[in-house]
Amino acid sequence: MSKEKVLDIIFGRWRSQILYAGVKLGVFDALREGPQQATTIATTLALDPTLSYRLLRALGSLGLLKEDHHQTFSLTALGEFLCQDHPETLQGITLLEEGPVHYALWKHLPAMIQEGKQNAFVREFGLMGFAYATQNTEYAAVFNMAMSSYSRMETAMVLAALTPYDFSRCTHLCDVGGGHGHLLCSLLAQYPHLQGTVLERGSVIENRALLWAERMGVGDRCTYVAGDMFTAVPPADAYILKHIIHDWNDEECMQIFSAIHKAAAPDARVLIAEYVVPGPETPHLSKLFDMHMLCWGSGCERTTEEYADLLEKAGWTYRKTWSAPAHPMSVIEGAKV
């Protein structure tokens, strides 16, 4: 690795914070209708014209905007992903991961590793992340926006990984911690014989306008149930958990898997979609995400072997890992025994 590569890593936060400022101030949405001069953008967004130009120039250097010789700026294809109305928007993820709440967590990383005790959320705010969201409406709004963006991206990865999977043996699929139901409804649309249930916290599913079932035309086959996955889940013959298990430590995961095992039909299947950690020779997003989880809560990213061990201890047996080339998310399959 060259010195320049190391410097590139060091300056990485400069880039992400410049990007965050552009999103937070509304720069990308302001350019949605077409090119504008820097002074016009500053006036529209009530910004200082001199300092906003310097920000716009920096965003141009990152390839998110394009500047001409008259200080006129326009969106690039990359910049479009940061607009609120883009179908694959990354705006929420930017506001969450580079916003002041998550930014504050990372300063605790060295101390946590020295002391052997993770969860910077508790260190910084005195609460677990989900509890903090119930008390801070601004953070909760950003968190939910980001989760929607994550969900759309990860649904595509899961569908790709499960392309060869035989769903014909399943009749009722329960999405545990399924949010607004984007993944489950995508699977119901693809497999018309399936019935589906989303299990989620009541506060997440209380706004019916946000739920995907009717919008995706599967409302007659999809039910939303408010509940606690640690204590009880609806009966089904297949379960899927997307980006859920990594939030929790081994003991907490055992509670979830045990609750599912108790409700599951004989020979049921459980599908665990996560960023599975590969061997030491492979650079992978999961190894970076694991540091984020160390800061955010009690969970971690795991290897296939670690997921298999958790399943076995909760009464399941590991069957297979489903993956798609070029996608960082995989699906661990377990069977009830």
Image (cartoon, rainbow, N blue to C red):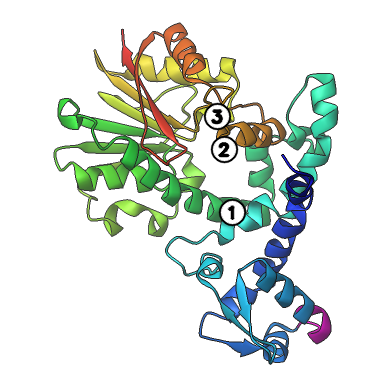
Residue 10, percent from left and from top: 79, 48
Q: Residue at x 44, y 38 (%)?
A: 200
Is 50 within the magenta?
A: yes
> Circle 2 is placed at which residue position?
285
> Circle 3 is placed at which residue position?
282
> Where 42 falls versus 182 (above or below)?
below
State yes or no: discs 3 and 2 in contact (Cβ < 8 Å): no
Dot 2 alpha-carbon crowd within 10 angstroms: few under 14, some 14 to 19, many 20 or more: some
As measured in the structure, the alpha-carbon distance from the residue carrying label 3 to the one carrying label 1 is 25 Å
Residue 246, percent from left and from top: 55, 29
> Where 79 falls versus 126 (above or below)?
below
- The magenta span reads 47-52
Mark 3 or 1, which is nearer the eye? 3
Query: Can residue 61 be seen by looking at this rendering?
Result: yes
Mark 1 or 2, which is nearer the eye? 2
Q: Could you tell me what secondary structure mostly forms the magenta stretch?
A: helix
As measured in the structure, the alpha-carbon distance from the residue carrying label 3 to the one carrying label 2 is 10 Å
Q: Which one is in front, 308 or 260?
A: 308
Dot 3 alpha-carbon crowd within 10 angstroms: few under 14, some 14 to 19, many 20 or more: few
> Circle 1 is placed at which residue position?
93
Task: Name the residue furthest front.
Answer: 2
Residue 207, percent from left and from top: 44, 55
- Is label 3 in a helix, a strand or a loop? loop
On the picture, is 69 further left or further right than 85?
right
- Is label 1 in a helix, a strand or a loop? helix
Is 132 within the magenta?
A: no
